[in-house]
Image: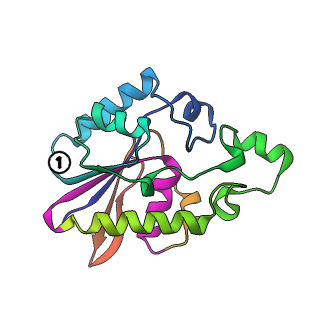
Amino acid sequence: MAEIVLIRHGETEWSAAGRHTSYTDLELTENGEFQARAAGERLKDRNFAAVISSPRRRALRTADLAGLTVTETTEDLAEWNYGKYEGITTLTIHESDPGWWLWRDGAPEGESPDQVAARLDRALAHARTFLPRGDVALIAHGHSLRAAGARWLGLPVEYGGRLRLGTATISTLSFEHGREAIATWNA
């Protein structure tokens, strides 16, 4: 049975520093480019019916370096909009808002968990339309793909906060006895 393959973009300067990065369009670091090529090596035996990417440069560059031809881009795969917290680390945010948790509270002047869930539900529903023809690659960002993992399982976005996801990792959404399952995570 075909799978949805989640590919997180390679490292950027901000991801390496733990800074929240949504709409700021950063390039990959040298290490991020290496990571993207390595992800491509792990994917080289897969044939994709569709390769759908976030429109951010870091995702598109990861696809290119991994040897994947993007068939379409969508804002539905863009990273969680962090609003006022763009470019800031969680540690710094906790200095003024110690109880804040993105997965429950959302981002001030950014997106709520429900808004992120709606976007990722659309992206997953769209990806499903290609599964009768083969695997589908979704190239995106850490928090948006963690949210996708939770939503694939029918869970609230909040559960994505419990799914760690490193840069340039590969995860697969699959089925077990006809029900949605995660076959691999953070590989």
Q: Is residue 153 magenta?
A: yes
Neighbour tally class for label 1: few under 14, some 14-19, many 20 plus, Cα within 10 Å: few
Residue drawn at the location 49% of the way across and 54% of the way down: 144
Residue 32 relative to residue 111: left or right: left
Q: Secondary structure at mark 1?
A: loop
**Residue 187 versus residue 14 in the image, above or below:** below
The kind of residue on which mark 1 rests is: Arg
Residues 100 and 27: in front is 27
Q: Which residues are magenta?
A: 132-154
Q: Position of residue 155 (x, y in %)?
A: 51, 73
**Towards the viewer: 106 or 7:** 106
Residue at the spot 67% in from the left edge and 49% down from the top edge: 83
Residue 65, position in %: x, y? 29, 31
Residue 153, located in which quarter of the rendered image? bottom left
Whether 110 is among the magenta residues is no
Task: Check the image and name the residue furthest to the top.
Answer: 30
Tag 1 residue: 46
Q: Position of residue 173 (x, y in %)?
A: 33, 62
